[in-house]
Image (spheres, rainbow, N blue to C red):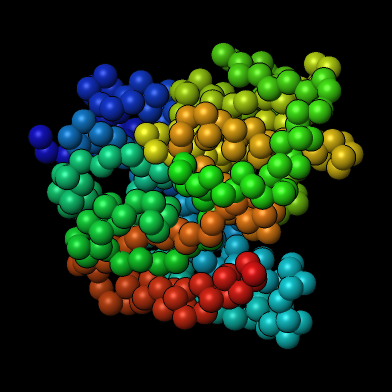
Amino acid sequence: MSAKIFTQANLYKLKWEKYYLGEQFRQYFSPIILDGVSNHIENLYGEVGLLAFEGYLLPFTLGNYKRKKTAYVASNISQYIDYAEDEIISNPKYKKQLRIIAPIVFEILRVFSRATGFDKCIFLNTFFLSTNLPQGKIPSGIEEAIKTLKKHYPNRAIVFKGIAANRSLPLLHRLKQSGFKTIPGRLLYFIAHDDEDFKKKRPYQQDLKRWQKAEGFTWIKPEKLLEEQRRTIVKFYKDLYLEKYSLFNPQYTERFIKAAHESKILPFDLLFKENQLLAAQAIHTNQNELTTPFIGYDQKKPKDWNLYRFMNIRMTQLAIEKNLDFNMSSGAGKFKKQRGGKPIFEYNLVYLKGMAFYRKWPYLLFKWLGNKYVKPAMLKMDD
């Protein structure tokens, strides 16, 4: 069966029931495609669609860098330039001289990248999350499906988002054999399902004891999220991801939270104490892996309430119960390594065949920069 492309114009023709997880995809993506992504993630602007082939659906987004503060989850310029500039300028770990010259260097890169159409691409496998959801088994027809996508959008590069090294090796190898090139992304942390050593680590044991002794805390898996709960979850997320970290993270709305939860692609667990909502995390599982690409908690509460620790121990225990690998996502490297997380690089894979050389240039530049400088720097800072 040949691959098909569904966008806002023809989504009504999609027979969701014929595809793996079709009903979940319908609830998650249909509102975004029909309403426009900006109504669900305020700092994203591109058209969203679905690539359908051999009983599977792969979401895609057409890159559309309209302005600064575009979410990096569907923008090369935001991920490799804006976010990197923001990180260097705001992080005192970097040398003062580097923080002074960074705005000049990154502005040159930004102008160059916009002129060469760095964001005129198709982001494939986009769920609009800081930690992209891992794909399970991908049919052998993915190569032909990608050719269909390329034929439909001939002037765009294809960027397959978020493939973790050593976690998606068959897909990684197949895409590379088809002509995709790897560009380093982020450093993730994993605990393998058969890793028993992390249970011996003192920080993990201490967190587990804290949770076992905690009084009045309860995790709840609601069937539906109340409007007040959705509002609180968005506030927790914004306080953490946007105010504390970066405005280049996705700016979710309550509509997105509602659809994500009800689709069961990202069901939320809520932490309460005496009927007060204190924390929320969305949990995604597939055949092999468990991850939480979305967390938020009440940062006004005292640190000795251990909310972040309780969220992590919750995820770890669920991974143990389900015998799944635990993708701990990126950031807080010291904390995660102390609890057994092993660092693994995540890559974006880019398909450039048929593109003019000047269009290939920014990808080749950031591939070179990533391998020569960014990866060593990330590993050094991770020590």
Residue 117, quarter of the rendered image? bottom left
Count of marks overlaid on the render: 0
- Whether residue 309 can be seen here: no
Q: Is residue 269 above or below residue 62?
A: above
Q: Give the residue displayed 26% in from the left and 52% down from the top.
A: 170
Residue 218, position in %: x, y? 73, 20
Instruction: Give the position of the N terminus as an image quadrant.
Output: top left
- Closer-to-camera residue (373/362): 373
**Residue 336, image x, y percentages:** 64, 52
Q: Tell me the residue at 59%/81% (across/down).
A: 105
Residue that lies at the very extreme toward the left in this rendered image? 1
Determine if residue 209 is in view: yes
Identify which residue, 30 or 144, lies in the foreground.
144
Residue 334 drawn at (x, y percent) = 68, 59
**Residue 327 placement (x, y as % from top left):** 51, 46
Question: What residue appears at the point 63 percent right and 67 percent down from the top-left corner?
Answer: 382
Left or right: residue 6 versus residue 305 is left
Q: Please indicate whether residue 178 sits to the left or right of residue 38 in the image.
A: left
Towards the viewer: 206 or 162: 206
Q: Find residue 83 and report its image quarter.
A: bottom right
Tell me which residue sits at (56%, 49%) in the image: 197
